[in-house]
Image (cartoon, helix red, strand yellow):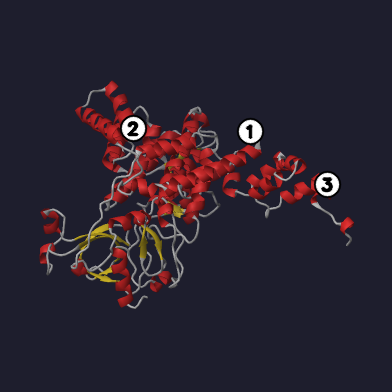
């Protein structure tokens, strides 16, 4: 082709140039570079429909933007998405330095996140997308154990009983290879923390909008989905058509109270199965009403042309009862007023579902599991019952126990004290006010621990307990046992060969617990596997298939452990 016949971008019509820029392979940054070349391309790159199409390339944003979003300047919206993505990454990358010696996010961090949330109408959605990108970058390290079927369990070298996972149902791990690596664990750990806070704020606004509607317009199905979303900040809740049955085998499981899990497993408890039953009948033109009957949730159907009702037990495959038969199911209620069989409103249904979840939380043996579930359940109950003094006070006490949300405790105590005097609330208020004054956003200094020859192991090593056969990873150690005498006596430390006069190690265990193990009870695992624990990322940045690599803060706390760990692994033949 002659040079004079060559076709350049300037020769293409605007419509074709716009079509080229709309291609999936053309990034937002490519469009910005093109726009800098000449005024014509800048005008084409300013087309709103082009930027609207680019937003669709973020499916987790586009799918959740309401159809009535009212967005007219899509180019500016893309700028907001990119700016928040940058700000979120900057925030998360610095949290380990700021919060390493804190158990939870601090008030200054919560405030910083809240400022970002309020920056634009859809900032929470854009922030969740940015946080999800951090969390899903690379292989997902198991945060908590998941239940395995029989075939998968046989392939596990040392199966351990699964620990409940309230916030996220992880995919089952595939066969482990020596090259399997999990990276960027610390940033993922804090991204999950921030996402939980952002998600709860979104859910609170959804619940406020729901509760502002007249009771007659409060849809039971919508509220049930909102309740399921509240307890699953890292899971996209969706509905599928399935068959259903009562879950008698695992009645007291959180999943039985979450509608998406019920729809997925096709098993549930009376209240969730009743909601599904009512939803199906509603679509068939049959009107059913919920009945908040003691001990067993039911629905009722009014017999056409009469004032009589049939009662239906969705848990028992839709079994029908007369009013007399329902009362006879609970002999102590046989002479009670039949008002117990009256219909209830959506709020009563949600409150009962939350109380069920609170009961599940109280059944957990591990206190961290208990509070991890009981706290959000109480938060949602306080949202539904804002005038209930006891619920509001319970929530403040939970915050105080967990050492979080001191600003909320202060505001809540001040509000409750206006209604009723309370010495406990006054003491809690005074204490939290002092904490807020002294709470600094500056990181606390990390004091290095010097090693001695009697310390045989190092942080980051995957270990095996000789007696209880559990897998764990070391994240700290003491030269001697630092626990009080009653703990030493209760744990039988005096029966050990070296008793308390030996190094003790802080370990994260595969069952999700934290333990304090004596050196004589530990040995280096010959088959190191990733430890399924939610706090792995707080201390470690990577699992390299053999051991865990400490993040900067743990490295600063135990500066000499890296050399010792490498030498031990070399002796064991791993290197």
Residue 407 badge: 2
- For marks 2 and 1 on the same chain, the one whose residue lies earlier in the sequence: 1
Find disc 1 in the rendering and name its residue: 70
Q: Is mark 1 on a helix, strand or loop?
A: loop
Q: Residue at the spot x=27%, y=30% of the render?
A: 433
Looking at the picture, tell me which residue is in the foreground, 479 or 564: 564
Q: How far apart are marks 2 and 1 (CA)?
A: 34 Å
Q: Quadrant of the N terminus?
A: bottom right
State left or right for residue 102 relative to residue 19: left
Which residue is identified by label 3? 13
Place of residue 169 in the rendered image (x, y in percent of width and height, measured from the top left): 44, 55
Circles 2 and 1: CB atoms closer than 8 Å: no
Answer whether residue 311 is visible to the viewer in this image: no
Disc 2 vs disc 3: Cβ atoms closer than 8 Å?
A: no
Residue at the image point whose x is 29% and y is 45% from the top: 444
Nearer the observer, 235 or 275: 235
Q: Determine crowd level at label 1: few under 14, some 14-19, many 20+ residues with C-alpha closer than 10 A.
A: few
């Amino acid at each position: 082709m002659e040079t004079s016949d060559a076709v350049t971008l300037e020769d293409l019509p605007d419509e074709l140039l716009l079509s080229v820029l709309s291609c999936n392979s053309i990034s937002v940054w490519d469009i910005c570079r093109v726009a800098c070349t000449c005024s014509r391309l800048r005008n084409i790159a300013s087309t709103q429909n082009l930027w609207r199409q680019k937003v669709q390339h973020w499916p987790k944003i586009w799918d959740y933007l309401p159809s009535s979003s009212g967005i007219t300047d899509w180019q500016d919206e893309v700028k907001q998405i990119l700016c928040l993505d940058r700000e979120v990454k900057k925030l998360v990358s610095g949290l380990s330095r700021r919060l390493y010696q804190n158990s939870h996010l601090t008030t200054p961090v919560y405030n910083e996140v809240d400022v970002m949330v309020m920056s634009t109408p859809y900032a929470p959605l854009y922030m969740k997308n940015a946080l999800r990108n951090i969390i899903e970058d690379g292989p997902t390290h198991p945060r908590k154990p998941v239940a395995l079927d029989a075939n998968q369990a046989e392939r596990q070298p040392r199966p351990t009983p699964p620990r409940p996972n309230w916030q996220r149902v992880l995919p089952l791990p595939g066969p482990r290879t020596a090259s399997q690596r999990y990276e960027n664990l610390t940033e993922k750990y804090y991204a999950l923390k921030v996402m939980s806070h952002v998600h709860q704020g979104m859910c609170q606004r959804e619940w406020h909008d729901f509760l502002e509607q007249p009771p007659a317009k409060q849809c039971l199905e919508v509220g049930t989905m909102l309740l399921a979303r509240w307890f699953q900040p890292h899971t996209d809740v969706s509905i599928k058509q399935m068959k259903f049955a009562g879950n008698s085998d695992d009645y007291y499981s959180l999943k039985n109270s979450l509608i998406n899990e019920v729809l997925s497993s096709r098993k549930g408890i009376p209240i969730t199965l009743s909601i599904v039953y009512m939803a199906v009948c509603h679509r068939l033109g049959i009107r059913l009403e919920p009945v908040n009957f003691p001990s067993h949730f039911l629905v009722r159907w009014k017999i056409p042309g009469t004032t009589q009702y049939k009662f239906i037990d969705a848990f028992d495959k839709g079994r029908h009862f007369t009013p007399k038969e329902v009362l006879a199911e609970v002999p102590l209620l046989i002479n009670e007023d039949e008002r117990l069989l009256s219909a209830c409103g959506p709020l009563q249904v949600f409150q009962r579902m939350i109380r069920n979840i609170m009961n599940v939380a109280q059944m957990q043996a591990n206190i961290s599991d208990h509070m991890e579930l009981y706290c959000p359940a109480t938060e949602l109950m306080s949202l539904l019952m804002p005038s209930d003094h006891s619920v509001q006070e319970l929530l403040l006490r939970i915050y105080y126990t967990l050492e979080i949300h001191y600003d909320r405790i202060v505001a809540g105590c001040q509000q409750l004290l206006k209604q009723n005097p309370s010495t406990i609330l006054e003491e809690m208020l005074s204490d939290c006010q002092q904490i807020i004054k002294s709470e600094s956003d500056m990181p606390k200094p990390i004091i290095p621990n010097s090693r001695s020859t009697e310390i045989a192991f190092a942080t980051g090593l995957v270990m095996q307990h000789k007696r209880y056969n559990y897998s764990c990873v070391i994240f700290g150690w003491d030269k001697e046992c630092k626990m009080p005498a009653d703990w030493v006596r209760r744990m039988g430390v005096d029966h050990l060969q070296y008793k308390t006069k030996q190094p003790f190690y802080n370990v994260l265990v595969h069952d999700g617990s934290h333990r304090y193990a004596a050196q004589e009870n530990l040995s280096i695992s010959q088959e190191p596997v990733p430890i399924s624990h939610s706090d792995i990322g707080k201390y470690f940045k990577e699992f390299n298939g053999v051991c865990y690599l400490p993040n900067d803060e743990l490295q600063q706390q135990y500066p000499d452990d890296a050399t010792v760990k490498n030498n031990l692994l070399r002796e064991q033949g791993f290197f």
